[in-house]
Image (cartoon, rainbow, N blue to C red):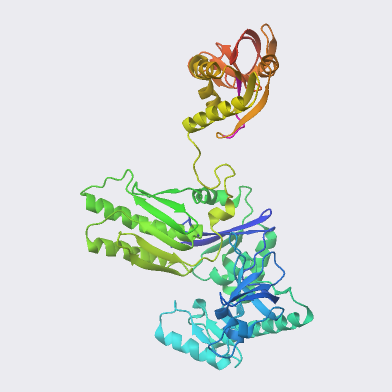
Amino acid sequence: MNKEIVVNSRGLESRIAILENRSLVEIIYERDFNQHLVGNIYKGRVENVLPGMQAAFVDVGLEKNVFIHAKDLVSIVEKDNFRIEEVLNPGQELMVQITKEALGTKGPRGTCKLNLAGRYLVLLNSKGHIGVSRRIDDGEERGRLRKIAKSILPEDKGVIVRTVAAYKSEDDLERDLSFLLNLWKQIEEESKLHNAPCLVYKDLDSLKQVIRDKFTPKIDKLIIDTKDKYHQAVKLIENISPKLNTRVYYYSHPKPIFDYYNIEEEIKGLLERKVALNCGGYIIIDNTEALTAIDVNTGSYVGRSDLESTVVKTNLEAAREIAKQLRLRDIGGIIIVDFIDMNLNKDQELVLEVLRKELSKDKTKTNILGLTKLGLVEITRKNERERVGDFLQQECPYCQGRGNVLSEESIFLDTVRKIKEVLWKKNVEALLLEAHPSIAARLIGSSGKSLKNLEEELNKSIYIKGNKSLHLEEVNFLKMGSKEKIKKMAIPLVEGEKLVLEVEERHINNSADGIARLDGYIIDLLDAGSLVGKKVKVEIIEVNKTYAQGKVIEVI
């Protein structure tokens, strides 16, 4: 399998794409104006202690205080059973490392169990703790690494041996540990020089973390599109894994690197609810505050033999795609998957086994809890970063996250109610309002019939302007007053007037004619249907309440 890391770092944003066989499997963002907090170590001051939650909030100088649970204090507390109010007091200073970014309304989460990650080891302030990555499944090698770690580790520290340390020499591990111990000493000295709250250690930026953690011999190429980042990468790789320097490339082509690798198109797909499957089926991904729901459908896929095989094939492909989308979109929390119903237990187990296998490739902790009584698959995935969709998008200011707008019929009926309410309350002769053209058309009706009926019912004059810039649900009441005053405002033309207009579209009922607008007022241009997009000089030949007619004198 061909694996590549593609880095786009031009402008105010760095984007790191991880590809497998030229297909996007992970995307990492870092923006110059957004703080990256996870891994940073701060000297903080306890703001308040909450015994009922067994938690505390610590001021580290950020916009929001850092949340710390009692279990995150274990490394600085000698006894096993304790209550947080016995250990922390408001005003107390302590070292805190950020473990989770602020998400939504929640502030960042932190811990006093500090760690520093190197190439092969993670240094801990947990005395005597020695762990070995579970991804190293060779029992003999695990024992060798544990023995080396125990022999080189200071008594007051702990360590976790990383996956990439497998089959490395004792010298490699000792060199990595020496670097981390020196860094730890620098952090301790820095903390003594400043008062809380303050930053004492800033973790590596995203590119350096990717090089440290993901740029292994399994990666064929690392391609970077700016010279400064390229040189930084080469320098870092020379220190941690010099043999891989020949796999680093500088991209100098004028075509944007993400376009060249077709990554931009794949990113756009991450914002869509619907994800197509190769077999013709599809999955729908819906995010809510509480959980993410994923629905599997056969779509246009009808199979070749029988319904059961069609369903199983669709579910198997969906299982692979779901695992990929969870990783790509950084979806965390509770995930519920509604696979297409399968009659045979062996088919259900096969689909679950494929899902487990694909999820095992994800370094973010993910658990499959099994099938519910309703046949739904429950999954939990650790929330580590903001979802790609949340990072790239904001809540729609019109629908406030509903994802739907009112139907034209509903808006039309609601507007009629509002017109009646306004005119019954106000002692005026006429009203001028503006609405989206599709709503204005419904209010006017065919040949102005709807508007005429409403005026007769209320015994008032009503003028309606279409405004394309308005949201579909938005209706503005512009002016109320005498008939003469409102008519003058609503009809901006007189017969015989000559002016230049743009033909915006064909007439919906007579394609030979074109439609132009002047301040939302409709002008039917005779025989101008073929001139859409062009500017024309016209003469107004007839003026009505809801529209005017004009003839084209000259095409400009």
- The answer to whether residue 121 is seen in the rendering is no
Residue 455 falls within the magenta-colored stretch: no
Give the residue displayed 75% in from the left and 76% down from the top.
196
Give the residue displayed 59% in from the left and 15% down from the top.
547
Which quadrant: the C terminus? Answer: top right
Residue 469 falls within the magenta-colored stretch: yes
Up/down of 495 relative to 80, above or below:
above
Residue nearest the observer in this picture, 322 or 415 = 415
Which quadrant: the N terminus? Answer: bottom left
379 left or right, relative to 57: left
86 left or right, relative to 320: right
Give the residue displayed 30% in from the left and 53% down from the top.
340
Q: Position of residue 274 (x, y in %)?
A: 43, 47
Residue nearest the observer in this picture, 245 or 8 = 8
Q: Position of residue 215 (x, y in %)?
A: 55, 69
Residue nearest the observer in this picture, 326 or 413 = 413
User: What residue span does the magenta drawing correspond to?
Assistant: 463-471
Count of residue discs: 0
143 left or right, relative to 172: left
